[in-house]
Image (cartoon, rainbow, N blue to C red):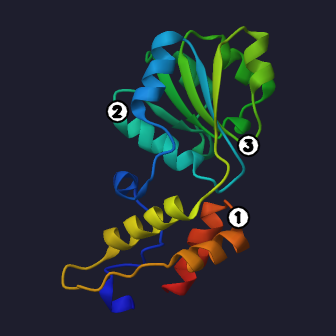
Amino acid sequence: MKEHYNFNPFAGVLDHEISHTIVPRFSVAEIASYIENNPSIAIEFLGKQGRGKTTHLIWLQQQLPHYPIFLLEKGAKVSEIIQHTANIVFVDSIHHLSFKERVQLFTTKKVVIYTTHYTRKISCLLVKKPMKTIRFKGIDTKILGKIIHNRLLLAQNETSMKQTTFSESELKKIIQKYGDNYRGIINKLYEKYQ
């Protein structure tokens, strides 16, 4: 099996490869519509760890590359976000900010698109910032099959004619074991292809 791939299909995906592997939960037009109707909206990507929030945030920012992304886990500061001249900012892991810092950020006229494990509705309500939540919950065999297929395709070497697929029953077993934890599924498949 390994000889058909240039690298483990379930290893980490580089940022520039995300668009080749993702099955988006929303369209860029949908996000643009929210922004157009509410020019200072907060859009939260809400869900447990491993559900694809950061992947979607990075992918969306790649579709709108003139707007910055701030990765709080990597040390970005709220002051950098607030002082940035962009009117749209992407913020990963907003839970790294204190309540006071979140309120400061939401007070700005910026569109803030962020990932979170718990809703930040109260912070937005306090400053009367309109908000939209996109939930990252649930999974089905069709989407999981497409994600797996995309990763296998990305890693496949040019000389290989073999196309590995997962049957509907295999996908159902994976979902039964891991639920909608994409990260858990990918980690398990990484071991299988190691």
Residue 77 drawn at (x, y percent): 61, 31
Q: Earlier in the sequence, mark 3 or mark 1?
A: 3
Mark in the foreground, 3 or 1: 1
Q: Secondary structure at mark 1?
A: loop
Amino acid marked by disc 3: His
Tell me the residue that label 3 is attached to: 117
In this view, 7 is above or below 71: below
Residue 67 lies in quadrant:
top left
Between 136 and 93, the one lying in front of the other is 136
Mark in the foreground, 2 or 3: 3
Mark in the foreground, 1 or 2: 1
Amino acid marked by disc 1: Gly
Residue 39, visible in the rendered structure: no
Residue 192 lies in quadrant:
bottom right
Tell me the residue that label 1 is attached to: 179
Residue 168 drawn at (x, y percent): 54, 75
Q: Secondary structure at mark 3?
A: loop
Tell me the residue that label 2 is attached to: 65
Residue 151 drawn at (x, y percent): 40, 68
Q: Is residue 115 left or right of residue 30?
A: right
